[in-house]
Amino acid sequence: MNRFSVNLSTVFTEVPFLDRFKKAREAGFDLVECQFPYANTIEEIRNELRRNDLSMILINLPPGKWEEGDRGLAADPNRIEEFRNSVEIGIRYAKGLEVKQIHCMAGVYHSKNQNVFNENLFFAGNAMSEQGINLLIEPINPFDIPGYFLKDIQQAEEIINSVGLPNLKLQFDFYHIERIHGQALSFFQKYAELVSHVQLADCPGRHEPGTGEMDYKEILLYLQKYYKGNIGLEYNPQGRSAESFAWLKEVTS
């Protein structure tokens, strides 16, 4: 059975971030992930993990100034030093929280030149490799983030092969791949050997499975049989968070 991880950046948002750890434990989870933990100290987060007997399995690198429109720094040729500083911060949080995977957002940058992105990934991947951490990249659909640099899965494959680091992996978000390409399961089957983490939400609303058009019964049956990693629940609950797991009880019973 796959191990499910609840994303505390999108689920249990009815309460402040540090209170979400208890909510996750009360809902029966032992794994959590989040996008950006940096508004809280490592010690604050670590205390909540220990208090609630949880493991944090994934974070993102700092994305730049999110409120000003930044969606990552890695593809921006004018912010290489800022990106390298973000790698140092991300690794420090990952080590402090015992996280073994970090997602690097590419950013909104309109250029066909991938050299800067590849070189930044090589720098980050090498730094993370020394700490036993995987570096993940993820295609993100243009409806949610217009102009996002990493915009399809073939591009992600080409980048991973070009950079050539064994710890550079693919984060496969079924919601994003469905919105970009359609037929997300077929793309997972094609690129599964590159995947180190899976996330899911239904399409098009990005709510929990069963609220949209995707056949999550088929997807989850396939993942249970062929995918051995963790599955992140990075969706926006349609109603109250605690009531959004009915589908999960069905597939794990």
Image: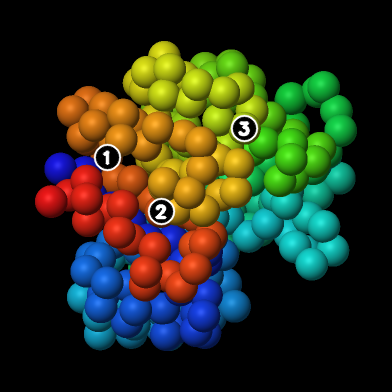
Query: In percent of the image, x 30 and y 76: which residue is there?
Result: 49
Looking at the rendered structure, the secondary structure element under dot 1 is loop
Residue 128 placed where, x, y %? Answer: 45, 46
Q: Amino acid at mark 1?
A: Gly
Looking at the image, is 59 positioned above or below residue 149? below
Give the residue pinned by disc 3: 179
**Residue for point 73% across, 51% down:** 71
Closest to the camera, between mark 2 and mark 1, is: 2
Type of the residue with mark 3: Arg
44 relative to 118, above or below: below
Per the image, label 2 sits on a secondary structure element best described as: strand
Is residue 155 among the parts visible in the rendering?
yes
Horizontally, residue 190 falls left or right of residue 149, namely left
Checking the image for residue 57, the label placed there is none
| Mark earlier in primary sequence (3, 2) | 3
- What residue is shown with label 1? 229
Image marks 3 and 2: residues in contact by CB distance under 8 Å: no
User: Which residue is tagged 2?
Assistant: 233
* Frontmost residue, 245 versus 74: 245
How crowded pointer 3 is (Cα within 10 Å; few <14, some 14-19, many 20+) is rated as some
Residue 105 horizontal side relative to residue 55, left or right: right
Q: Secondary structure at mark 3?
A: helix
